[in-house]
Amino acid sequence: MKKYIIPSLLFSSLFCTVTQAHEPYVAPLSYLTANTQIPVISAYAEQALNAEYALKQPSFTITQPDNTKSEIQTAEHLKSATVFDLPLKDSGTYQISTQISYPLKYVQHNKEWKMFFDMPADQATPIAERDYVIPSDFKKVPVPVEISREWSIQSFVSKDKTSPVTGITTSPIQVEFKTHPNSIYAQQPVQITIKKSGQTFKNAELLIRAQGQTDKQAQKVTVNPDGSATLTFPHAGQYLIEAGEIFDTKNKPVNQYYTIISLGVLPVLTQ
């Protein structure tokens, strides 16, 4: 996955951050709780789970333990993060999700498709040091191909106990857990299946990042041809797992889809 993006509302004043992989996520303050409500944080971040820029007034879908759904409308109160309270009326697992899209432009350069940003040359690093292109890289700028990048961001909160969860069917890429996502222990293998539009996903790429890790520090996980994969988390803490499609720079770009899920991994299970 090559992801060099920042939120559109920041782009005009933050050219210097365009080479950083700012991606959205959503995560509760705690994944297991006995509280009647809990804060939830969502943001764009270059380092996993370290909020840097707020999302712009997203609406979150909450799937209750009884599988009924509700919507939470948020207001942008902070520059660094979008924060809201999640009511926890009943015992069981609540699933939090939303989808965020961002327009992108691609052009061909030296027979490879690269993201195109309309920015001055004096605000970009030398072309040999970047994976995107700008107008000054061309004698005549080609007509860009415009696509959309869509993230489905998800997380889980369990009050008092866990209850069954299902994949988000509205997300183009679904991640199904064989182990409950709030019952994952460090160093214990976890089986998942990745699907695209409900079908076998043969070209999936899967990344794991512990809190604070950048995209370049991500652990790449092997995905089998049937979309199955095994996750193992080295230690307790918060993680992001990201499932997407391998991007071939030789092929003309099409709309891109990613699913990013935050998890709270428990300490090593002792016998």
Image (cartoon, rainbow, N blue to C red):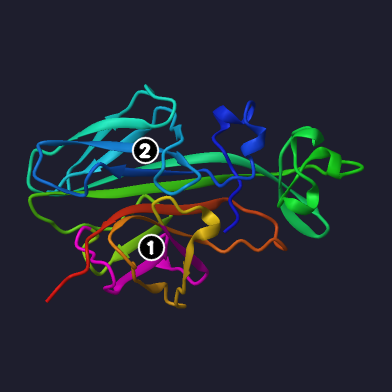
Q: CA distance from mark 2 to mark 1?
A: 26 Å
Q: Which residues fall within the magenta stretch?
A: 182-209
Q: Residues within 10 Å of mark 1 (few under 14, many from 20)?
A: some
Q: Who's the residue at 42% across and 72% down the image?
A: 227
Position of 225 with respect to 11 (left or right) is: left
Task: Give the secondary structure at mark 1.
Answer: loop
Question: How far across and how far down the image is residue 180, in percent?
Answer: 21, 63
Magenta residue check for 206: yes
Question: How far across and how far down the image is residue 95, in percent?
Answer: 24, 48
Residue 234, placed above or below residue 36: below
Residue type of the residue flagged with mark 2: Ser
Q: As drawn, which residue projects farthest toward the right? A: 139
Label 2 vs label 1, nearer the camera: 2
Whichever of labels 2 and 1 marks the residue nearer the N terminus, that label is 2
Residue 149, placed above or below residue 84: below
Question: How far across and how far down the image is residue 205, in percent?
Answer: 50, 66
Circle 1 sits on which residue? 198
Badge 2 vs badge 1, beta-carbon distance below 8 Å = no
Residue 20, placed above or below residue 52: below
Magenta residue check for 251: no
Q: Quadrant of residue 15?
A: top right
Circle 2 sits on which residue? 42
Q: How many marks?
A: 2
Position of 55 with respect to 68 (left or right) is: right
Q: Which image quarter holds the C terminus?
A: bottom left
Task: Give the secondary structure at mark 2.
Answer: strand
Q: Who's the residue at 56% across and 47% down the image?
A: 21
Q: Where residue 68 is drawn, which disc sits there?
A: none
Q: Which of 200/49 is in front?
A: 49
Residue type of the residue flagged with mark 1: Gly
